[in-house]
Image: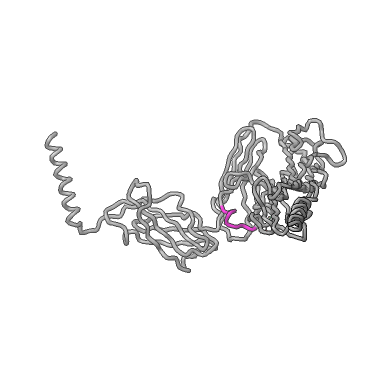
Amino acid sequence: MRWPSLLGVILLLRESICDPKIATKSQRFEVREGSTVELPCHVDDLDTDDTITWETSEGTISLDEEKLTNDDSLDVRKDGSDMILIIRNVEPQHSRQFTCKLPANDASVTHEVVVVSSPSVSISPDLSEMTTRKGDKVTLRCQATGNPAPEIQWSKKGGQIERDVTRKGSHSLIFTADLNHQGVYICSARNKIGEARRQIDLKVSANGNQLQGEGVKPWIRTDFGYLPVHRGNSVNISCRFDGNPPPNLDWYFNGYRVKMNDAKFKDAKEYDQREKNYTLSTLEVHNLDPDMFGDYSCQASNNFGSAIEVIHVSGNPGPPELSVDGTSLKWSVQSKAPILEYRVLFRFLKQDTWTGKKSVSADLRDQTGADRYSNSIDLASFLQRGTTYEVQLEARNAEGWGSLARKFVTVDVPGSDEASPGSASTHLVALLVLVTVWLNL
Ligand SMILES: *[C@@H]1O[C@H](CO)[C@@H](O)[C@H](O)[C@H]1NC(C)=O
Ligand SMILES: *[C@@H]1O[C@H](CO)[C@@H](O)[C@H](O)[C@H]1NC(C)=O
């Protein structure tokens, strides 16, 4: 009986001596955005049936080598007594604590990951050179991203920024242009990882346009309300405007300011060209894809008011122009891609939904201009006679259905020459009613 109990003691000892332990110490990892980091977790006296987990406050990442998260950038690798957590293509959201744990005895080690990135800067106006007139109000803005948050600073090449320049935070310079404001303005953004800068060369023309006589509220004009485009192409969207003092112009896309640092507009350019009695502002947009189809608006504002114009840019067909001649409906639609089909929508007077639809196929002969398609149909061929209708139309190309016409048309479809017995009796009843009313008077 002595031997087995001794064996028991040895086993018991072995059990307590060989309790697994995490040997790795907590560390802080500063990692550059986009790079890869490996978080160590070395376990001493690891037994084959001990499990190791990696966790964050959001949940468990892995159980041994099995991944429990669907974050593609995370992976685990077992290497002997090491369970290594690998984070690839590190993003700001990986700035957090990662814990390696032995659930069996609650041992753990927590590493902290801090994602750092060097600054990137954007300025507005997004121009390398800008000419303004004496008396114009100028606002230079600077924005920067990076981690740690960069320090932003405006400076003027070879000198100091004039005292009459108002600073809004460290990001904006606001002033009324005068000759002494000319020069190269540099915005630099710096953190401990790096530095970035952008500059704008400001020129002030002396034949200033200080407010002379009365202020004029801005006016604005566009040549097109709709610009047909091909997916993937580029387009120049422009507006002419003027006012006194000279207005500031801003571009909007579907109601939001167009930001040149937005991924959609990263290759976009905005430029202003002064003509004799107006300024032409152009927004040049590249690589149009369907999420860039929509309403582009230019808004001109000065102290006396503002004015706005909207240009719809799309690969889908534009709003048709409708005209009616008798019962013949004629239309013309702009589209870059060939029109495949039209749909006439109709309803009785003052209804609020288009209850009737009639498809009209398009053919090659419909093309009547570079981007223009026209056709017509006799409404009397499918609408009920002796009835008044409201009529609309839409067209379809490879991108899909386009807009409705800006205004529907109202069409009287006259009754046929031989009045049907139904309508004759209706007339008779009406006549009798009239006669009765008259007799009663
Ligand atoms: C837009 O205008 C610029 C400058 O006038 C010109 O170089 C460019 O070709 C134009 N782009 C398109 C798509 O018309
Ligand atoms: C600009 O000047 C031209 C010619 O001088 C004139 O025809 C035009 O009407 C002017 N436009 C405006 C908006 O004043």
Q: Residue at x 79, y 40 (%)?
A: 151
Residue 6 percent across, percent down from the top left = 77, 55
Q: Residue at x 74, y 40 (%)?
A: 140
Magenta run includes residue 288:
yes
- The foreground one among 72 and 151 is 72
Residue 120 percent across, percent down from the top left = 76, 48
Residue 120 visible somewhere in the drawing: no
Residue 80: image quadrant is bottom right
161 with respect to 92 (left or right): right
Q: Quadrant of the N terminus?
A: bottom right
Say above or below: 95 vs 47.
Answer: above
Q: Which residues are magenta?
A: 287-293
Residue 370 percent across, percent down from the top left = 55, 63
Residue 212 percent across, percent down from the top left = 68, 32
The residue sitting at the right extreme is 158
224 with respect to 183 (left or right): left
